[in-house]
Image (tube, rainbow, N blue to C red):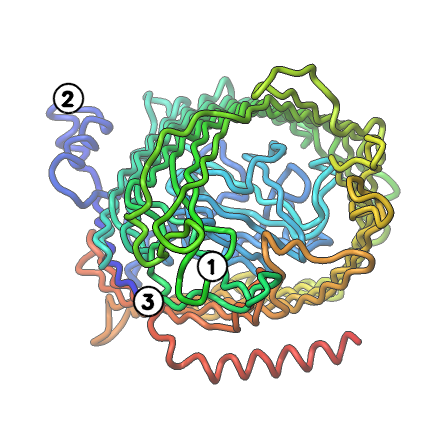
Amino acid sequence: MTITMNLRRRTRPNKALAAQSGLTPITLALLAIWAGPVCAQVSAGVQANGTLPPVVVSAAPDATTEGSGSYAARTATVAGKTEQSIKEIPNSVSVVTRQRIEDQNMVTIQDALKYVTGVEAVNYGDGTAYFKARGNLLGIEFDGVPTVSGLQYLQQFDLAMYDRVEVIRGPAGVMDGAGDPGGTVNLVRKRPQDTFHVSTETQVDTFGSVRQMVDVTGPLNKDGSLRGRAVLVGSDGLQSVQGTRNKEVMAYGALDYDFDPRTTLSLSAGYQVTPISGLDYGASGVFNNSFTALTGRVPSSYSQNFSPSWNYAYTSVQETNANLVHRFENGWKSQTTVFYRHELLKADYAYAGPGASANGLSYYGDQKQRNSYDWFGADTNVSGPIQAFGQTHTFTIGANYSVLSDTQQSGYVALNGPFAGGTFSLYDPNAVPQVDVPYTNGSNNIITQYGVYAQGRIKLAAPLTLVLGARETFFQERSQSTLPTISDWTTQAQLDHRFLPSAGLVYDILPSMTAYASYSKFLTAQTATTYTGMGLPPRTGEQYEIGLKNSFLNNRLSTTAALFRINDENRAIGDPYHANGSIAGGKSTDEGFELEVTGQPLPNWNVYAGYTYLNVNYENDKPNLSDGTDPKSLFKLWTNYKFSQGMMNGVTLGGGMLAQTSISRGVEQGAYAIFNLQAGYRFNKHVEATLAVNNLSTASTTLVRRAISTVCSATAAMLC
């Protein structure tokens, strides 16, 4: 259980003082920051219920959520590069708004995605995580630019840098190209605002962690055509695993410049360093007597650290982004985004395995690694309306390019311990020595993907829209060994002139109710080879989805219900006749349904709830236990209510839960539920504080487990 204290302060700059003293708003902002650990946040006034009014952002997309005060987003860009009504997208789309990020004290992308319907977010122990939806890995975009291999097991920027997190579940091949069919995450940066605004936020928790955030934005010239923003974050503290300490320093800066009312250039840069000491990858499962299978977990608390205190990892991330938008008088818009990111990982650590004995003995080894990643991406597109046959249709045409160049070096030394067979005790990890580990393996790798795409929203009739998409995609993956010897470059996978289509129908039953059906194709390059060394064809498949979307209370509250099925073929499996080869003979189906409710049932009440049932079936294949199996049922809830009248005026109450059925990673993890509570108080229009209690109790989960099991059994029967 953790308890987190969060303190915010909001105020208005004294314009008279600024005029008299000659100080610029940015100077006043710096003075306000230096004045104390809590912050100033400027607004144009406070509403009667004590909440801030919506913030007007110049030259920012309509999909911006900052200042909305709501968990519901009306539009998103992840499904078509431009702002589209979520209700009119024939796919499942979720958005974690800025308001929900702040209410739930989300700091990392793991915090956000674990509260997205149908998404599994599993921490890996070193500050990174892996993410899945609908039984498959997720891909990523940064401000709409698809980025190959840019999400899984990689450090990401602090969420203080972003306005929102958009997620589309299911294949997104038309916009992103070849990749897994789980879906795509789009991280959208905060943009500079056209009114001066300063905020700071201080968090402390019972593990001893402290986090400070400062956010300054506003116009930089008299006419407001040049706007700037700077976000700084610093944190230091222990984690839930004993002895693990995580530090972070992040800086983000952005400039928007209006060349004229229709043309805007946006530039941004970010830098973050994250050193972690005492990192722990956990303990292996307990072997049976014949050492052929795992029987369970090593007896211990969930906060036990099984690694020596000298374990250390350091990650630095640098990023730059440029975006140019021009809006034509006829309603068309062109936009081009260029993106670059560099990430460096250095680590030296010991870990246990393979396997462990029932009394907690295990082998250990020391590992050292140094990985460097460089991503470059670009996306350019034009979009706009066309009048034909008495209806207004919209089209988007574009192209994008993404390349990842990485260099990896690693070394491993098996250690000889004092117990039987050279093992160590998992309960005394500091007895594991730190030794000199030379680099013995190394490689250079380049993954390149590019393509052209088009999407059309064709009005067949007033209530009926046909959504068609198509992409011609190209993909190549090449590698070169650098250690122990240098080899020539070889091509691991290549796809040329591959066509990826999608189609959808959207029917407006009522102005507030929309039904949809969609089809989308995907393909995924594979690096496995046959026993003769020949490459395998790509994984291929398609998704079929139907759903119903509703909006209520003047679009304050939205609901989504969706049924889906993913057919996945040509999966690489072991060759039954040749031990050293693979064949493209595996098949799987992922099917289920999702329910989501998000928004404001009442003006002061925000709620989010999502439920997913997933059934994964394999034919001539088996699940990859390195990432674990997928829970059949996932339920997520968060709610927040702000009192604005009477004796409770200024009080905020919130809470939520996460629950899932059992999974297996060689060792079964049973169903569980986690409950969180939050209470806050607004002292005045400038200062508010919240107290959050996470993982409140594990004793009351039995009833929830039984309820989830009942729901799982019922839904399984419905799909059979």
Q: For numbered disc 2, what is the local secondary structure?
A: loop
Q: Earlier in the sequence, mark 3 or mark 1?
A: 1
Q: Earlier in the sequence, mark 2 or mark 3?
A: 2
| Residue at image location 25% in from the left, 45% down from the top | 211
Disc number lying in front (2 or 3): 3
Residue at 40% x, 68% y: name it: 299
Which residue shows up at 43% across the image and 32% down it? 368
The amino acid beneath tag 3 is Lys
Q: Quadrant of the C terminus?
A: bottom right
Q: CA distance from mark 2 to mark 1?
A: 69 Å
Residue 507 seen in the current view: no
Q: Quadrant of residue 390?
A: top right
| Residue 581 pos. (x, y %) | 80, 40
Query: Where does residue 62 sit, x and y in percent of width and height?
Result: 54, 42
Quadrant location of the N terminus in the rendered image = bottom left
- Categorize mark 2 by other alpha carbons within 10 Å: few (<14), some (14-19), many (20+): few
Q: Callout 1, which amino acid? A: Ala
- Residue 333, x across and y down, in percent: 65, 29
Instruction: Give the residue number, with chain letter if any, for mark 1.
Output: 356
